[in-house]
Image: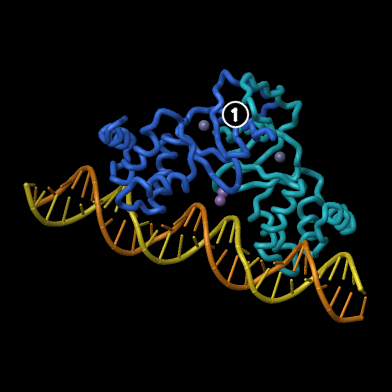
Chain colours: A blue, B cyan, C orange, D yellow
Amino acid sequence: MSNNDTFIQKLRCSGLRPTKQRIKICKTLFDRNNTFHFSIADLAKILESKSSRKISLATIYNTIHSFKKKGYIKEISITSDKNYYDTNVSNHHHFFNESTNELIDLHDDDVEKVRLKKTLPGKKIKSIEILVKIANNK
Amino acid sequence: MSNNDTFIQKLRCSGLRPTKQRIKICKTLFDRNNTFHFSIADLAKILESKSSRKISLATIYNTIHSFKKKGYIKEISITSDKNYYDTNVSNHHHFFNESTNELIDLHDDDVEKVRLKKTLPGKKIKSIEILVKIANNK
DNA sequence: CAATAGATTAGAATATTTCTAATCTATTTT
DNA sequence: AAAATAGATTAGAAATATTCTAATCTATTG
Ligand SMILES: [Mn+2]
Ligand SMILES: [Mn+2]
Ligand SMILES: [Zn+2]
Ligand SMILES: [Zn+2]
């Protein structure tokens, strides 16, 4: 259970002003035991349910974009109809359960290291990530 | 250079009526030598430039959705701001050039086969795909 | 070659994302 | 320490993107 000051500090450190809206969003995203995979709609719904004062959807977008830019979260694209963000910002792989729309982290030691045989001259590799789509049996 | 009849047949085979709109879209997508990676906006622009009669954007969406359902194309999600479709419907990997927004197919023999050490009981694997993000040097 | 049932199109409605004027925050000046 | 200023942030409005559904088109039946 982090207190507000933790988040105020975190925000100040990266040059973001610790506004009420941002602190609330930090609490929702980071005051958790596990990685959180969420869409903007998920986040808006949670904020609405717990918040007294409404945070405008535009502000949620603004905040998520600046948190992404600052490296607090990363974007995960799976399907066209729902975009996800991830509080685990490391380079990592995912299971995506198509039956439940659930996203699950894979750890590095769950997968043999990916070996590319092809290289592209004049290009540098920024990330290599695997997406394993799964479905419930039956 | 395929003629219209090829596409009319293709459409009829999967139970889709060969309308003018669908034939034009087939020509644009499949009358090519190479895999085509495109967004709805890309496709709309091409259709607009070559077409005499305008195809409504709603129809482009409808058609792309039914072509996807019939397995003519597959969806590739890379970033939240642009969704891609791919005329290569096989399970395959991609390079994505973040400097140019270009998507390039990787062939199976360009990558060592992915080995998962972790399995999920009660789930079946539908696909395993790698996304390699790259950028131009300098 | 109607009449009918069902599929398809595309304008209208809705949903998502971005833009920007008004507000708020932090810093500087008096 | 209060007021002025510069710049950051919020959130309603505008713009884009996607889906819905009434009107139209296509294929089948008699
Ligand atoms: Mn979208
Ligand atoms: Mn999208
Ligand atoms: Zn993750
Ligand atoms: Zn491809």
| Quadrant (top left/top right/bottom left/bottom right) for the C terminus of chain B | top right
Relative placement, left or right, of B127 versus B15 is left
- Using the image, determine if residue A18 lies above or below residue B47: above
Residue A116 location, quadrant: top right
- Using the image, determine if residue A19 lies above or below residue B52: above
Relative placement, left or right, of A74 versus B34 is left
Relative placement, left or right, of A11 versus B11 is left
- Residue at which label 1 appears: A128
Residue A16 location, quadrant: top left
Q: Give the residue drawn at x 32%, y 37%.
A: A11
Can residue B99 be seen? no
The kind of residue tagged 1 is Ile
Q: Residues within 10 Å of mark 1 (few under 14, many from 20)?
A: some
In this orientation, which residue lies closer to the viewer: B87 or B63?
A: B63
User: Is the residue at mark 1 in contact range of ligand 3, meaning its CB lies under 8 Å from it?
Assistant: no
Q: Chain of mark 1?
A: A
Q: Could you tell me which secondary element the residue under label 1 belongs to?
A: strand
Q: Give the residue drawn at x 80%, y 64%.
A: B19
In this orientation, which residue lies closer to the viewer: B38 or B92?
A: B92
| Image spot of residue B72 (x, y percent) | 77, 48
Q: Give the residue drawn at x 80%, y 57%.
A: B16
| Image spot of residue D19 (x, y percent) | 60, 58
Q: Give the residue drawn at x 32%, y 33%.
A: A10
